[in-house]
Image (cartoon, grey):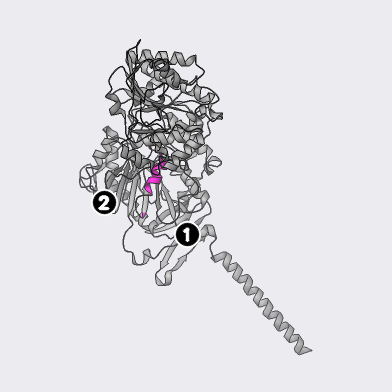
Amino acid sequence: MKAFQVGVWSLWSIWLCGLALFCLSLYATQCFLPSLKDQIMRPKLSQRDAGVSEPPRIIIFSAPRPFTGSVGARQSLAIRSWLALSPQIAVVLFSKDPSVVSFAGAFDSRVLVEPNIDFTFLGTPFFHSMMARSRSFSSDISVLVDPETIVLPDFISTMNYAYKLDHDWLLVASSRNVSDLPFYLDEDGKHWRRENGKLMTTQEEIFGQSWQSTTCEGKLLMAWNNKDLPLHSGVLPPFLYGRGVHSSWVVSEALSSELRFVFDASWTISSFYLVDQEHQTDWNVGGSNASNFERSWEYAGNSHIGALYGSLSYHEINYHSLVKLLKCDGQYIFVNTTENIVCPTVYQSAGRLWKGWILRFGWKKNTLAWAEGVKSPGQLSDCSQMVPTKHTKPLDLPFSLETLLSFNADKNNTIVLTAAGYSYKDMLMSWVCRLRQLQVTNFIICALDQEIYEFAVLQGLPVFRDPLAPSEISFSDCHFGTKCFQKVTKVKSRMVLKILMMGYNVLLSDADVYWFRNPLPLLYSFGPAVLAAQSDEFNKTGPINLPRRLNSGFYFARSDGSTIDAMKKVVAHAATSDLSEQPSFYDTLCGEGGSNRVGDDRCLEPETNLSVHFLDRDLFPNGAYLDLWQRKKVRAACVKQGCFVLHNNWIRGRLKKLERQVLSGLWEYDTSTRMCQHHSKLVKKV
């Protein structure tokens, strides 16, 4: 019996010991193994830290203004400071301005200009297009920085450290502002010197004075490694660069997506920018001469988009809660000031072993005081002004039709005009993208409804409303033969007449006309008192000016007396007709039944002496001519034929028209990203 009791107690002791060991291991796990959040906050270092070979290849992206005056001088100094950081740094400038190209030409292949992104008609670059284009460049680290921000050498050591992190990461850093610069970068771009020419020996000496930190959005530097993961989930909306919200939006989405380790490196990256006290402005990008008031819509548009899409639409970023990267006694450490956590990382080369420790609450006195200093206001803590707000009032361009015409007309005082409703927004954008590819920028858009107007404003297009446009356009399939179509076409002729009377020539082009080449040089050759129009004749042979074969979806009209008088007659005729404007064009100018025909390709209106020239269909084919739309390779067939344009007409139904154009490859707009499709054409190579 005694032996049995001893056995039972032995079993109980073994069981209790096992339970104690289990509890101890569980406690040790909770105490010493980091949580997922801590693992993200304490990234591992890769093998690159062991042998350390090549430094990372870094590309700095920016979007400068034209290099003129004090702005050009500040941008030049900033870019020189970037190049002075390391031979491994290249610079890509998003711009289409000639002065930027000229500036880049003064440097070697480390600086190039990239014009193949989307811009507004005022020259402001689209942030989402810049970010997408940056992915086409090969580098280890990408950096986005304001074009006037000067960056100092500690940027390189921070990048070298971040490059060794195993986690994909995104860092942000704010800049300081200064009204006077008591030192300069020498001519060879390698050293900072005092005003007396003596060398500035330490970075602390440069920042020896008290300068103010910028707000979180205006001059925020962002950098990320180019490894496996995107910066965030979802699609980046069409923000305008330098107009607020977009940087906060990216940081918010990166934090919400939890794909990358996001941290604040404002204390380990020294950067600053000069404030022009006489001409202080926040309108820091874009190539137009538009005034500050005229650019206010760009900020309102960004705020509106930020309030509609993404996590920033329902909560504000607390930049103060971001993990901070600091440097203490020559060692980088991560600090979470909201949870009182310090995470140094130590690498042991043997077997890729890692040691990291978390110091909670029991910090050394000097470490605690120092970390508490990090909590102080400044740097990225004050970002409340960048919270996006959804606008209850409709977005408006502060431009009249007269102003848009003066901004966009070419040297010949010519405007390309199109009109569209919201149901045709994608086709409109493909048309716009194609004209941009051809470097045709003298276009404006007549919005036929409020929806397309606001869409066009957010896309940065030169758009104006027609207050007399029919109200049902947005809610119907407005294609050929419908009552809606008949009303829309009359809007076009009325707007053409209005613009002609304001002294501008007009090329009216429907959005379903695909341009292969710029036709304006050819159209100018027809001279005054000539209206050049596309023929809608489908027969391969015979006259092309037969009754009602004038296509009013593509024609060129000069602002001269004969043309204006003839267009008045067309508009008056259309106003009393139950048909579209197209029969009114032919019956008024060529006479009913073609009584004013001259030869096989002309008409002469006797009262105004306006000559109507029907354009060669080999160069300006309609949708039925030669069955071009049925070819397997529509583009190749049209290019071989020498087409200037190809009209996507002679097909009934909007969806069928869209399908035909997309499947043919004559489509230049990505509806998923809201960006034009760009073909690589670098001004300079890295």
Classify the position of the N terminus by image quarter.
bottom right
- Residue indicated by mark 2: 201
Magenta stretch bounds? 120-140
Q: Is residue 302 visible in this depiction of the protein?
A: no
Q: Give the main secondary structure of the magenta stretch.
A: loop
- Residue 618 % position (x, y): 33, 33
Cα distance between the residues tagged 1 and 2: 33 Å
In magenta segment, residue 685: no
Secondary element at tag 2: loop
- Residue 429 % position (x, y): 43, 35
Marks 1 & 2, CB-CB < 8 Å contact: no
Secondary element at tag 1: loop
* Amino acid type shown at disc 1: Arg
**Hey, which quadrant is residue 646 in on the image?**
top left
Q: Residues within 10 Å of mark 1 (few under 14, many from 20)?
A: many
**Hey, which quadrant is residue 411 in on the image?**
top left
- Residue indicated by mark 1: 42
